[in-house]
Amino acid sequence: MASRNSDLDPLLQGGVRSRSAPVYGSALKNEQDEESQTKKFKMLSTGDNRDSTASVDSAAQTKGKAAGASRFIYYIIYALVNVIISAPGLYGYAAVIFNHPVYNEHMNALSKLVIFSSLIHQLGFLLFSTLDFAIGTVQDAGLIFLSAMANKIADTMLEDGRSTDEILTTTIVLLSAGTALLGICLIIVGRFGLADAVSYLPMPVVGGYLAYIGYFCCQAGVALCISTPLITVSDWAYLFDPHNLLLAIPGLGAGLILTLASRKISNDAALPLIMVAIPASFYVLLWITGESLESAREAGWVGQVAPPVPVSDLFKLIDLELVHWSLATEILPTWCGMVFVVSFASCLDVAAISIDMGEALDTNHELATVGICNLMSGLTMGFTGSYIFSQTIFTYRTGVHSRWIGALIMVVFFYIVVSEVNVLQIAPLFFLGSTLIFIGYDLLFEWLWEIRHQVFITEYGIVILTFLAIQVVGIDGGIVVGVLVAVVDHVVLTATSTTITKVHKRSRAIWSPEENKILHNHAYNINNCQNIVTLELTGTIFFGSALQSLNRIVDETYLNQDTPAPGPAADVMHSPRTPHAPALSGMTRRTTQQQDRVSISSPRRSQKGGSMVIAQPAGRPPKYLVLDLLYVTHLDASATRGCFLQLVKIAAKQGIVVCASGVTPRIEWMFRTHGVAYPSTEESAAVKARLCSRNPGKSKPKVENALLFVSVQDALEFCENALLHEYKAQRHMPMPIIPNLVGPVQQSFTSVLGKILGASEDEKQALSRLEDERYHEERVLKSGEILFQLNEHSDAFYVVLQGCVANNSGTDRAVGRLKQKVFSGAGRVGSKSNLLDPVFLAEQEKAGTSDVAASLWYVGSVVGFLDFLLNRPRLFRLVATGDNTMVAKVSQSNMNLMKAEDPELHALVTRVLLNAAASDLANSTYNDE
């Protein structure tokens, strides 16, 4: 794509650039190749004859001039083709804009004003567009708005008894002022990169408007054919007059021929040739029949004779003293609609040109260019315009990419303006009307028929409704109706797209066999009862889906049942909690459960007697309900109170603990503000500690609000901890220590590995040889201190001995979710989650790194072992979330030394890694985003 600063001279800038290799392009290339070969041959020939060299240069110059002249002929041809395509339509556009009877006597002058406006638009694109082949004139997108404003001004002033001169000058001045202001708006939108804001106008609404433009162009084209204004739908009754019908049929037929030619014939020359052939055939027919032009005029086939309009008369149309500026407020709503529609249509044109070129265009820059052209047009008493997509693409496909074409188009436009010849009194009216009808057919077919295959049925309904609404209540009202229906459609669609799915997940922590059996029997036993239930919520939860979401949650968790939640019943031997399972025996069963997803909308079915029977289980409410909100994109106040506040109140009455994970700062603030969650992190932490540190014989503390967690794994680990405490408290069994809830508890490296292995006495004895730190390094970290970076070489794995570490390099989506800015009606209330250590957040902000914690690992966790085992770069950044975090680091060199000096110990550590890897695989039931 050539720069917009390229010179007009094709000989200097290489004006021909062929895309589809047309014949003329090959001819020029052959001429240049001949010239090059001749010059090379002469230069390589022997001898010192300077006259020979001079003759070669002279021949080359002659060839170059011939090629330049040949090339310029192509510029003239394609400029004329573009004028043949556009000029008749511009006369039709003038008839559309000024279709009120009060403007009829000045139609010749107003038509020239529209053409002069197109000249100014083309000048703007010539100077400022990045496309050398850009064609821009007055465009169809703003026609109806201009027409509506012109009619409004005329009707209002006629009611007030104003003269034709007052109406004419007021209309031209206010329409041109609106065009200039539109240009300023587009410049601002383009310069500040706000083109995306234009998309807030729904495409189906714009489609309905463009379909109405098609209808209006057909109506205006028929009106031009029969020389009678058609303003309302009832005016089509004029065609019941046989003479009017006879005048209209050729225009309707010619418009159909042009439409079929543009859609069915791939040759770019076909449409211009047909447009020349239609009026030519009319004159041939007159010659054959012996009819004169005057007799054709009397029959209504040609426009009436009108006095010539010199250029000086165009300026006489404007008298600023006669302008009624107060009418600007009357047309302001229509002007606002025009800004959106013209902006949207211009963006569509730029996108279509970009697609056809196969090159990316800067939409904001091109929109600003359109704005500059409209500003220039408005300041010269012109009207709205934009890129003419079809002609720009036509010129591009010719391969002749030169600004000379645009300059020559301007020359022809200027000649039409200064000429005293009235085209309307020599051209057949049905031909001028057919150009409008052609545009109308094309728009109607595209936006009422072809669009069916590109939109949903509800969107297609909006297209039709907008089209009909504009017919009934006018442009402004019709577009408003279309937008309102589109908003309702979006609300309904969003409400129905919110999904709540029951998922069978377990925490990352893998317990000892005895504790794992307790959890299986009393937490995740889907055949008996589930005391820990996880629901995954996705989409937007708002006022339209709040009640529906609450009902789904209540139905799925049986909160509408009066049966109290069951307590643990089985008595199993206690074994201390460990983060990783000692063996793989129970993993197959767990993995099957974790991967099973049950949609809440699908009832359980059983096969009975060869027929499908719906089985309704007698479910009981769980003890712990985990809500995974990771994929909830938005939550409003109505849904907060109507769904989640009601949920926690219902759950509290039945002694059910509600845990919410994956909340964004916006959702967290909403929950705390409306009483869904505890107001402060300290209160929530105290409740968590009470649930997991009860003495035997004490009852379960009452939980009034939801408990918030960073991730679903944290929530599930807490629920499993709490359930095990409840089970053991009822049986007066020893209570395990929960490191992430009761302060800075530390475990030794050997004890962690022993619990992971479920080590025997001999294995514990062997593991004791790790106590001297010969084969590992123990590090104490500050909050925010980095253990390893993203993409860093994996030379070690880590075991958490105290505190917590976090994955600090979430995806862009995760970072964007967790760093949302929160603004209430009283102002900004923060943009950071309160679920993480404030010291950690401060350190991360000070270091300029992300304060996102995509995943957390607590005491006893093995971290970074997969990258270590696979010898691949780190897939995330690992940081400490608090002061005095302690980890044990085992490097590759440590492992090599251990293997050489103590093979038995090396085998045990390798088993630890394998068990950790297998357990992590079995528990990887969610996305770490």
Image (tube, helix red, strand yellow):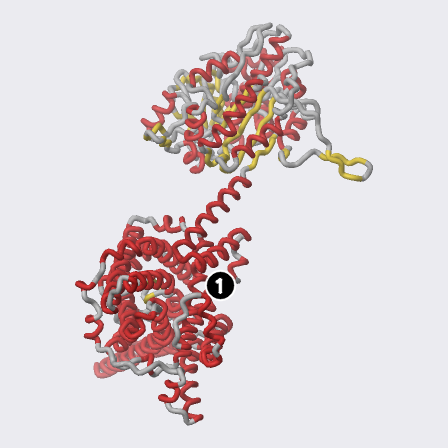
Residue placed most toward the observer, 603 or 429: 429
x 54%, y 38%: residue? 498
Of residue 170 and residue 794, the one placed in the foreground of this image is: 170
Q: Residue furthest right?
A: 609
Quadrant in which residue 221 is drawn: bottom left
Q: Is residue 417 visible?
A: yes
Q: Quadrant of the N terminus?
A: bottom left
Identified by mark 1, the residue type is: Glu
Q: In this orientation, which residue lies closer to the viewer: 243 or 379?
A: 243
Q: Eyeballing the image, is 324 above or below 294?
A: above
User: Could you classify mark 1 by the number of other residues whose Cα lies within 10 Å: few (under 14), some (14-19), or many (20 or more)?
Assistant: some
- Residue 621: x and y, percent? 63, 22
845 left or right of 616? Answer: left
The answer to which quarter of the image holds residue 767 is top right
Does 603 appear above or below 882? Answer: below
Position of residue 894 measured from the top left corner of the image (x, y, whole percent) = 49, 22
Q: Is residue 814 above or below residue 9?
A: above
**Does dot 1 land on a helix, a strand or a loop?**
helix
State the image coordinates of residue 572 (x, y, percent, origin top left).
67, 12
Q: Is residue 793 above or below residue 211?
A: above
**Image point 61% across, 26% down: which residue?**
557
Residue on which the image places disc 1: 446
Residue nearest the observer in this picture, 817 or 823? 823
Which image quarter: residue 428?
Answer: bottom left
Q: Residue furthest left?
A: 321
